[in-house]
């Protein structure tokens, strides 16, 4: 797992996680820019992030919307 403190470039199947500040001003997400919404980026996660993706999918509609609104405020 690539840690947030690592200064080394990611290798193999590791990807650098971009900081969340300025998230609302981005129009492309993920390491390859392949998602055009935050929600699509979350849903593309797998591997070590699969649990987070599953938990996102299990949110109530109100919590789902609140989380996306929060992320859009960053």
Image: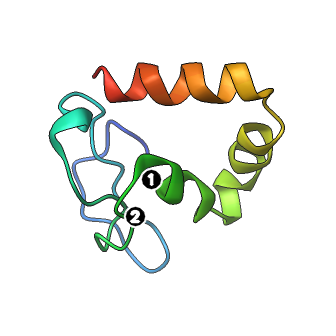
Residues 2 and 50: in front is 50
Query: Horizontally, is 33 left or right of 39 in the view?
Result: left
Q: Secondary structure at mark 2?
A: loop
Name the colour scheme. Answer: rainbow
The correct choice, above or below, for 37 with respect to 24 in the image is: below
**Residue linked to disc 2:** 15
Q: How many marks?
A: 2
Q: In the rendered structure, are the residues bearing label 1 and label 2 in contact, judged by CB atoms less than 8 Å apart?
A: yes
Q: Quadrant of residue 30?
A: bottom left
**Residue linked to disc 1:** 2
Residue at the bottom extreme of this rendering: 12
Q: Secondary structure at mark 1?
A: loop
Query: Horizontally, is 27 left or right of 73 in the view?
Result: left
**Which residue shows up at 69% across the image and 20% down it?**
63
**Which residue shows up at 36% across the image and 74% down it?**
34
Q: Residues within 10 Å of mark 2 (few under 14, many from 20)?
A: some
Q: Quadrant of the C terminus?
A: top left
Whole-percent x and y of residue 64?
66, 29
Whole-percent x and y of residue 14?
45, 67
Residue 1 visible within the image: no
Whole-percent x and y of residue 40?
51, 59
Q: Residues within 10 Å of mark 1 (few under 14, many from 20)?
A: some
The correct choice, above or below, for 19 with respect to 21 in the image is: below
Whole-percent x and y of residue 58?
84, 38
Q: Which mark is residue 29?
A: none
Residue 9 visible within the image: yes
Q: Quadrant of the N terminus?
A: bottom right
The correct choice, above or below, for 39 with respect to 11 in the image is: above
């Amino acid at each position: 797992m690539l840690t947030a403190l690592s200064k080394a470039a990611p290798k193999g199947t590791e990807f650098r996680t971009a900081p969340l500040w300025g998230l609302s001003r981005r129009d492309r997400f993920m390491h390859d820019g392949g998602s055009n919404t935050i929600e699509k980026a979350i849903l593309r996660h797998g591997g070590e992030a699969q649990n987070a993706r599953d938990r996102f999918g299990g949110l109530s509609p109100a919590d789902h919307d609140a989380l996306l609104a929060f992320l859009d405020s960053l």
